[in-house]
């Protein structure tokens, strides 16, 4: 039996929860609270969730877990079999983790300072909003970011969903930053002052959020 260490509302846990359900795998869940990470540290030697325990193997980091699931249970796939397409997906995952995530992380760090630099926050916010156009284009002519449902959707959805969804019980600052800076607000008001539909500016992205949100999670 697989064991998954998780915490409520965790974006990185949701990545893995989507992937496990896609592969039809079940897990025993160990729910931790951020105020006491001792169970996670004890099992993995580091404090962050998700952590997956598969027999003798202990895997931390959501992207590494996605790769482990693919290697152990290749069907149904989350990564393309063709090496060139797989390399492209690897690039997308690394870009999302190492580039796309930087602005919201930097806004969080700025807001936690005694005197936040609001010009810097505005510039970071513009980068986040600008990225929505990229995802809109990635969804041109296809239902998912990389063709069929894949690791790219697992990795991006838990963050991008805040453009239109947030559980009222979730009060994490990082999630509020995602919500505030990715909002699908339809752009500029019309000349008569009325506001376009909330998803008018990025209809494919909006439909993708609804589509992926309908998928099961473990
Ligand atoms: N690179 C790691 C990041 C894991 C991570 O930041 N997990 C968050 C939950 S989404 C966490 O454990 N946060 C606890 C904290 O920072 O206090 C991954 O992809 O799994």
Image (tube, rainbow, N blue to C red):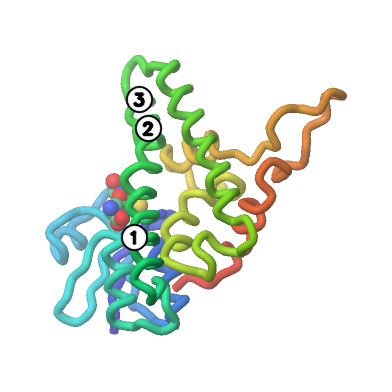
* 142 left or right of 55 in image: right
Q: Earlier in the sequence, mark 1 or mark 2?
A: 1
- The circle drawn on residue 110 is 3
Q: Say what secondary structure mark 3 lies in.
A: helix
Q: Which quadrant would residue 57 be assigned to in this image?
A: bottom left
Q: Quadrant of residue 116?
A: top left
Does the residue at mark 3 contact the one at mark 2 (Cβ under 8 Å)? yes
**What is the x, y in percent for residue 160?**
51, 49
Q: Which label was assigned to residue 90?
A: 1
The quarter of the picture where the N terminus appears is bottom left
Residue at horizontal 44%, vertical 61%?
Answer: 152
How far, Cα to Cα, is label 1 from label 2?
27 Å
Q: Residue at x 84, y 23 (%)?
A: 191
Q: CA distance from mark 3 to mark 2?
A: 5 Å
Q: Assess disc 1: are there few (<14), some (14-19) or many (≥20) residues with their C-alpha within 10 Å of its C-alpha.
A: some
Residue at the image position 34 percent from the left and 83 percent from the top: 73
Q: Nearer the viewer, residue 173 or 24?
A: 24
Q: Which residue is mark 2?
A: 108
Q: Earlier in the sequence, mark 1 or mark 3?
A: 1
Residue displayed at 38% across by 76% down: 81
């Amino acid at each position: 039996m697989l064991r998954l260490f998780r915490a409520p509302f965790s974006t990185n846990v949701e990545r893995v929860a989507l992937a496990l359900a896609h592969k039809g795998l079940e897990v025993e869940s160990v729910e931790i609270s951020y105020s006491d990470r001792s169970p996670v540290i004890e099992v993995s030697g580091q404090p962050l969730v998700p952590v997956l325990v598969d027999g003798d193997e202990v895997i931390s980091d959501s992207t590494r877990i996605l790769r482990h699931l693919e290697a152990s249970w290749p069907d149904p796939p989350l990564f393309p079999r063709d090496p060139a397409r797989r390399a492209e997906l690897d690039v997308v995952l690394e870009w999302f983790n190492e580039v796309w995530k930087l602005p919201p992380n930097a806004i969080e760090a700025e807001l936690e300072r005694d005197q936040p630099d609001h010009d810097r926050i505005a510039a970071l916010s513009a980068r986040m909003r600008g990225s929505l156009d990229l995802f809109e284009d990635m969804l041109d002519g296809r239902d998912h970011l990389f063709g069929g449902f894949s690791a790219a959707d697992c990795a991006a959805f838990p963050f991008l969903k805040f453009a239109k969804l947030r559980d009222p019980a979730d009060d994490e600052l990082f999630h509020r930053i995602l919500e505030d800076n990715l909002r699908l607000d339809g752009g500029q008001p019309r000349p008569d002052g009325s506001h376009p539909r909330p998803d008018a500016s990025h209809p494919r992205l909006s439909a993708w959020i609804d589509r992926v949100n309908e998928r099961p999670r473990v």
